[in-house]
Image: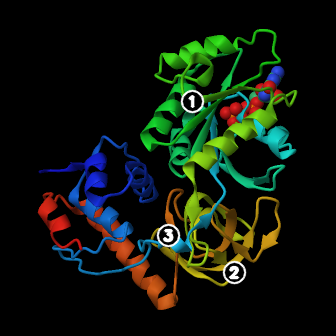
Amino acid sequence: PEAITVQELAKRMGERGADLVKSLFKLGMPVTITEAIDQDTAELLVEEFGHRINRVSESDVEIGVGGEQDSPETLRPRPPVVTIMGHVDHGKTSLLDAIRGADVVSGEAGGITQHIGAYQVALPDKSKVTFLDTPGHEAFTEMRARGANVTDIVILVVAADDGLKPQTIEAINHTKAAGVPMIVAINKIDKPGANPQKVREELLQHEIMVEAMGGEVQDVEVSALKKTNLDKLLEAIHLQAELLELKANPDRSAEGTVVEAKLDKGRGPLATVLVQRGTLRVGDIFVVGAISGKVRAMIDDKGRQVKEAGPSVPVEVLGLSGVPSAGDLFTVVENDARAREVAAYRQTVIDRKRTTTAPVNLENIFASKE
Ligand code: GTP
Ligand code: MG
């Protein structure tokens, strides 16, 4: 075989296809479950998932980080990560503002979101939800894809007076590719021209059958402006999250994904990291992409300094030696030497990916699997 589809590889590894897609995304490869990947990528995935393999090619480094499975008894419930997607101006940020009791929209240039915002919200029952806001403008396809790939649930926002638009459809495709469940929020129902039923019918044309049409996808009519039915939307999230039984081990070294990164004039390189397992602490030494660093400070979504961040918590991390790429895997390691080793390893993998045309041989990948 020349290559293997993500689906097939997942089957052989005994893992969920959606988890592989997520990992690939973290490695900077946005592919769908039906697409084929090459041998190097497949090996990398197998490593990420902690299956022991012996590399047959030049690099025999067993870095042994970032892949260990957490045993079931270490797992604790964690908050769902919910990404809000949809066409430009359909009210994503407004909806999140309404849920948070905040006002981000009025501070945005031209009222257009140009980055991924990450927030944690406490629900009335004290449980927490992590929200990622994404831009709807057509220029930000990659951010939408990334949002779909680090999330547990997607909320598709469709304005009831406008219906399905190109980036709505794009968001549907990202969500399907990522294999995550969707909740449809039909927004702006306060508007005179609102036609929620038309939205439901248009969704049907894209193979999304909402509950109101006898299907399984939850749909909620809302108005971010009038704060109508926000409780119903939160309830829908709660219900969906319960079905997923989301868990992570908080008592291990942290791993996460960069949702955005930038160079700040005053504070240097900054990365917003979504912690996915373990607990990230000030002082931790880490590798992100092929960059190493030490957590100098962490800032939460309310601008407060925090000392630690557990699973599903988004934090801004200071202390990087360079600006990583959004989507990079963030891994805490034991010490500086280890950080340098892992960074160097990742760099060789990156370099090799650029140059290699090695034939795929699945025997090699799986022959030494335990
Ligand atoms: P991008 O991030 O640029 O894709 O836009 P967005 O989807 O975040 O939309 P945003 O929240 O910025 O809202 C766009 C416009 O729609 C703003 O003028 C909002 O006030 C308005 N809007 C949002 N929700 C509602 C609603 O429920 N009803 C009405 N009437 N207007 C709304
Ligand atoms: Mg917005």
Pointer 2 or 3: first along the chain: 3
Pick the residue in front: 15 or 99. 15
Closer mark to the observer between disc 1 and disc 3: 3
Closer mark to the observer between disc 2 and disc 3: 3
Residue highlighted by disc 1: 217
Under mark 1, the amino acid is: Val
Closer mark to the observer between disc 1 and disc 2: 1
Look at the picture and state if 13 lies above or below 242. below
Under mark 2, the amino acid is: Val
Residue highlighted by disc 2: 282
Look at the image and tell me whether residue 112 can be seen.
no
Query: Which quadrant is home to the C terminus?
Result: bottom left
Query: Local crowd at mark 3 within 10 Å, few (<14), some, or many (≥20)?
Result: few
Cα distance in 3D space between marks 2 and 3: 27 Å
Under mark 3, the amino acid is: Pro
Q: Which residue: 46% across, 32% down?
A: 173
- Label for residue 72? 3
Pointer 1 or 2: first along the chain: 1
Mark 1 touches mark 3? (CB < 8 Å): no
Q: Which residue: 86% across, 43% down?
A: 103
Cα distance in 3D space between marks 1 and 3: 29 Å
Look at the picture and state if 253 lies above or below 21. below
Look at the picture and state if 77 lies above or below 57. above
Q: Is residue 304 left or right of residue 346?
A: right
Number of marks in picture: 3
Look at the image and tell me whether residue 8 can be seen.
yes
Q: Is residue 244 left or right of residue 25?
A: right
Cα distance in 3D space between marks 1 and 2: 41 Å
Q: Is residue 129 left or right of residue 368?
A: right
Q: Is residue 32 left or right of residue 366?
A: right
